């Protein structure tokens, strides 16, 4: 087992992370090589964590470069055969990680192995599912054994460094959302498999960010989800209605943005502003290509 531990580096990408959640994550994986990269440049958090845990490398970024760029930077740096991307709000035991490595070695053409996720109340939460032209559906159905699936959430995914380099790394045009669907789809396209282990458990608490400014939180979440959704479905070329629907609603969103300001409902106003800005930024970069497709 000790040899398997030396075969893997665990990477954790942070942005204004909750200290207690991060502690709960780290205390279960102390024996592994851990690299943390923080997109919020939180020196206070770094000093606290390296005081309590042995961290192989702790990187601070001066600005939020997004998950994909941060993860790619670390993946290229690691010197182990296996890499696990682990969210700070995810708790997984050491033995569970070793079982993921063992399964990865067992199955031919395996690209990703992942546990089955439960919430804090031990209820099955979002796990694997299948691709859809119009949406990404999520599955909360219990299954038995090891199952080959279309895609899994990226909260605790294990893969070989060489495999993800061969496939082109995480797509850095995606900032935070849809990256797990994207990487699993590309794996499937080259006849690689994604395997979920029903008997290997992880707890995903869907953590609480420490972004104190509610308006900033609404803006960041809405803007990047909207932009990444537009890009992902544009990329796979199967759902131009995502772009069309938002384009038709822009005038309505603009009205709602202004209307909610007058009603002092600033969170809702920022929500609509974020969607408008994401659409405009996406269109500026990709609209000429969309016209060729539509």
Image: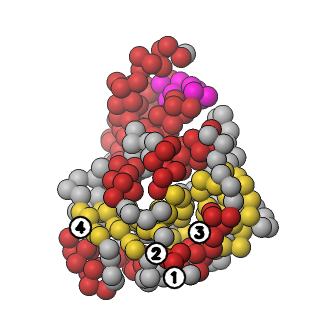
Query: Residue tagged by mark 2?
Result: 6
Vertical position of residue 280 compared to residue 59: above or below: above
Q: Which mark is residue 48?
A: none
The label shown at residue 101 is: 3
- Looking at the image, residue 105 sits to the left or right of residue 91; the answer is right
**CB under 8 Å between discs 1 and 3:** no
> Of residues 126 and 214, which is closer to you in this image?
126
Mark 4–mark 1 contact, CB under 8 Å? no
Label 2 element class: helix
Q: Which residue is mark 1?
A: 2
**Residue occupying image coordinates x 51% and y 82%:** 2
The magenta segment is 237-247
Q: Tell me where residue 51 appears, x and y as whole percent.
A: 26, 84
Q: Residue furthest bottom?
A: 52
Q: Is residue 212 magenta?
A: no
- Distance from disc 2 to disc 3, alpha carbons, whole Å, reads 11 Å
Picture quadrant of residue 238: top right
Which of the pair 219/88 is nearer the observer? 88
CA gap, disc 1 and disc 2? 7 Å
Q: In percent of the image, x 77 and y 67: which residue is there?
A: 145
| Front in this rendered view, residue 204 or 215 | 204
x and y, in percent, of residue 59 in the image: 26, 64
N-terminal of the two: label 2 or label 4? Answer: 2
Q: What separation in Å lies between label 2 and label 4 (alpha carbons)?
A: 29 Å
Residue occupying the point 47% across, 34% down: 231
The vertical placement of 28 against 143, above or below, is below
Q: Are marks 2 and 3 in contact (CB under 8 Å)?
A: no
Q: Which residue is mark 4?
A: 42
- Residue reaching furthest front? 3
């Amino acid at each position: 087992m000790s040899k398997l531990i030396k075969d893997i580096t665990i990477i954790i990408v942070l942005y204004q992370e909750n200290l207690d959640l991060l502690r709960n994550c780290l205390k279960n994986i102390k024996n592994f090589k851990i690299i943390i990269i923080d997109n919020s440049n939180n020196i206070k958090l770094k000093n606290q964590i390296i005081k309590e845990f042995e961290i192989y490398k702790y990187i601070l970024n001066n600005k939020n470069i997004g998950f994909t760029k941060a993860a790619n930077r670390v993946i290229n740096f690691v010197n182990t055969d296996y890499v696990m991307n682990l969210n700070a709000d995810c708790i997984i035991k050491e033995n569970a990680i070793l079982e993921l490595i063992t399964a990865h070695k067992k199955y031919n053409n395996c690209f990703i192995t992942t546990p089955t996720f439960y919430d804090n109340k031990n209820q099955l939460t979002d796990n694997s599912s299948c691709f859809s032209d119009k949406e990404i559906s999520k599955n909360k159905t219990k299954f038995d054994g090891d199952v080959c699936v279309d895609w899994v959430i990226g909260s605790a995914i294990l893969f070989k460094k060489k495999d993800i380099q061969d496939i082109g790394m995480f797509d850095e045009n995606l900032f935070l959302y849809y990256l797990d669907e994207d990487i699993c789809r590309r794996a499937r396209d080259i006849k690689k498999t994604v395997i979920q282990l029903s008997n290997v458990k992880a707890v995903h608490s869907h953590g609480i960010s420490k972004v104190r400014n509610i308006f900033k939180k609404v803006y960041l979440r809405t803007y990047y989800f909207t932009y990444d959704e537009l890009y992902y479905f544009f990329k796979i070329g199967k759902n131009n209605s995502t772009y069309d629907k938002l384009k038709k609603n822009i005038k309505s969103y603009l009205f709602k943005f202004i209307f909610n300001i007058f009603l002092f409902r600033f969170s809702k106003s920022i929500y609509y502003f974020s969607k408008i800005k994401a659409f405009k930024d996406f269109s500026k970069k990709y609209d000429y290509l969309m016209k060729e497709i539509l």
